[in-house]
Amino acid sequence: MAKVELKQPIVQAIADDVKGAASVVLVDYRGLTVAQDTELRKQLREAGIVYKVCKNTMMKRAFEGTEFAGLDEHLEGPSALAISKDDATAPARILCKFAKDAKALELKAGVVEGTVYDNAALSELAKIPSREELLSKLLGSLQSPITNLARVLNQIAEQGGAEACAAAAETGEASEAPAEETAEAPAAE
């Protein structure tokens, strides 16, 4: 069996993994201890990210004709792939956070939703909160006014203000007071 025939399934597996991916990030993993690598793989797996160490030539062949072909120039030295199909910023976020503690881990480049980013740009992308965090912030901001209104109404009810407001509305005291104030205002001028 020729060498090409042995390598073709590996190239196809990489191509299948990156097909339909929201993002792919390349890292240089040299210098990581076994414990660090195990912890990194665990964090990536929990986030639903595929992490593979592959030969650069295999990755180049798998990237041919795809939006990930822009990563070819960064395929030097040992490289590993972090692939996410759901959350586009998750690989960059997890890898950047992990690289703060494990100085040996170095981000090379990545493709996020069709755009190639270098190491500095990936660090900026890592600052974007996850989808779940953004949704919880949105929900909190939507609930805040409703919660505040409920508190105010509850305080009025506790102080007996509801009956006083209703009694004032029935006798017409509330509607007469503003009319008198507006009548006095033009006379003062």
Image: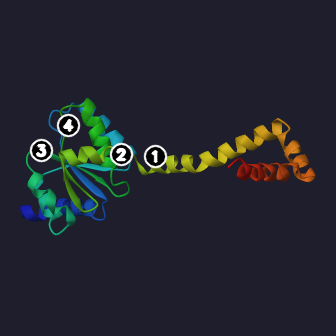
Q: Earlier in the sequence, mark 3 or mark 4?
A: 3
Image position of 70 with respect to 120: above or below: below
Image quarter of the N terminus: bottom left
According to the picture, the residue beneath numbered tag 4 turns out to be 105
Image position of 131 with respect to 67: above or below: above
**Side (left or right) of 96 relative to 46:** left
Distance, label 2 to label 1, CA atoms, is 19 Å
| Residue 40: x %, y % from top left | 30, 38
According to the picture, the residue beneath numbered tag 3 turns out to be 78
Along the viewing direction, whichever of 13 and 115 lies nearer the viewer: 115
| Residue 91: x %, y % from top left | 30, 48
Q: Amino acid at mark 1?
A: Glu
Q: Amino acid at mark 2?
A: Arg
Dot 2, crowdedness within 10 Å: few (<14), some or many (≥20)? few
Q: Amino acid at mark 3?
A: Pro
Q: Secondary structure at mark 1?
A: helix
Q: Which residue appears farthest toward the right when viewing the image?
A: 171
Image point 20% across, 53% down: which residue? 117
Q: Are marks 4 and 2 in contact (CB under 8 Å)?
A: no
According to the picture, the residue beneath numbered tag 1 turns out to be 133
| Residue 46: x %, y % from top left | 39, 44
Q: Earlier in the sequence, mark 4 or mark 1?
A: 4
According to the picture, the residue beneath numbered tag 2 turns out to be 45
Distance, label 3 to label 4, CA atoms, is 11 Å
Along the viewing direction, whichever of 158 and 34 lies nearer the viewer: 158
Q: Which mark is residue 115?
A: none
Image point 7% across, 61% down: which residue? 3
Q: Earlier in the sequence, mark 1 or mark 3?
A: 3
